[in-house]
Image (tube, rainbow, N blue to C red):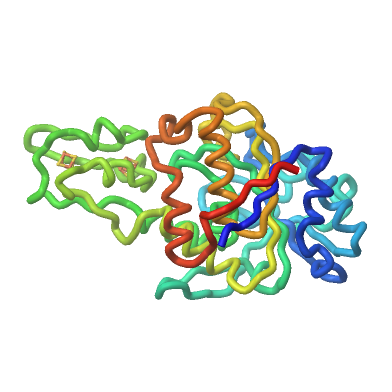
Amino acid sequence: MNKVVFFTDLQKLPDALNNFDMKSFADKRVPVKLHMGEVRNKYFTKPDFVKMIIDELKKINVDPFLFDTTVAYPGLRHYVSGYQQVARLHGYTMKKIGCDIIIDDSGVIKTVENRDFEVAWHLVNSTHIIAISHVKGHIQTGFGGAIKNFGMGGVTKETKKRMHHSSRPIYNKDACTHCGVCAEVCPFDAIKVTKNNWNRNKRTCFGCGVCINACKNKAITYEDADLQYLLALSAKACLEGKNVLYINELKRMAKSCDCDPFPGKIIVPDIGYLVADDPVAIDKASLDLINDVKKDVFFKENKIDPFKQIKYGEEIGLGSSSYQLIEF
Ligand code: SF4
Ligand code: SF4
């Protein structure tokens, strides 16, 4: 069945929300899941926009709170207090937004396809969720949208760390012809190949999987699984059985994500906003609209097929890639 995805602008976005069953959100404490930006990043979702959504929710008697999780890598956002500090720096204060701002560091194990994911406590304990996802490129997963907002952003830093490790490459020297293709495509220059040697720098390897996809001889495989597959599973662990309304913001789209202090220049012109109740449909519609404006831009920039998240998401029953786009 085709999912309906509404394509709108800032002015009409509040009305577009009312195409969905917003009444079911009334009288509930509802997390508004978003990424409040890494230090020095300029492209993260802006507080004025988020306040507009919060105000709309309050009008229908929702009790919203902004919500994100701590990150796996070192830095201020590794800790609850540090992330709160960064959020304040970026304009996310209770005074400005008018609701609580909660950074979660605790989780509850949820199992999907025999894999465990520690889902943030506040998501597990909510029946209704609003997702605000800033769409942009991503150096490890091709792009980030609604699936990634939960697949990585909805779980604890221990699970984040494990997911990244799971997608690191394992080398089989018997199958290697030393062709050097993997070294050529590695975006982080982590592989060195000579006539007799193959070496991967574990410190600079991000586990993106680009080398694995490029090796025709299957001489490199995932330690466990493709990161984009794990993202889809993890998103399902966060979202299964919940009532979720997704807003994708297709603005300020750079090569790299909001976790990156230096995400690069904007590579896609601003497009607008999408609203849907399916994470796979809204991400597929986002990528299709971006491709209409600049064909394969994320793939060209990051050498990773961003549609893999969509394919995996559909395969595991996270959502549907068939959608009907309605301009609103
Ligand atoms: S692409 Fe595969 S076969 Fe070629 S050097 Fe790398 S691992 Fe070996
Ligand atoms: S997984 Fe990515 S970063 Fe690591 S060696 Fe392969 S291409 Fe390079």
Of 287 and 55, the residue lying toward us: 287
Please determine whether, in this image, residue 129 is positioned above or below residue 172. below
Of 207 and 14, the residue lying toward us: 14
Please determine whether, in this image, residue 177 is positioned above or below residue 101. above
Image quadrant for the C terminus? top right
319 left or right, relative to 276:
left
Q: Is residue 100 visible?
A: yes
Residue 174: x percent and y percent?
A: 7, 51
- The residue lying at 62 percent from left, 66 percent from top is 120
Please determine whether, in this image, residue 241 is positioned above or below residue 11. below
The image quarter in which residue 128 lies? bottom right
The image quarter in which residue 4 lies? bottom right
The residue most toward the top is 265
The image quarter in which residue 59 lies? bottom right
- The residue lying at 46 percent from left, 72 percent from top is 112
Image quadrant for the N terminus? bottom right
Residue 184: x percent and y percent?
A: 25, 30
Residue 45: x percent and y percent?
A: 70, 41
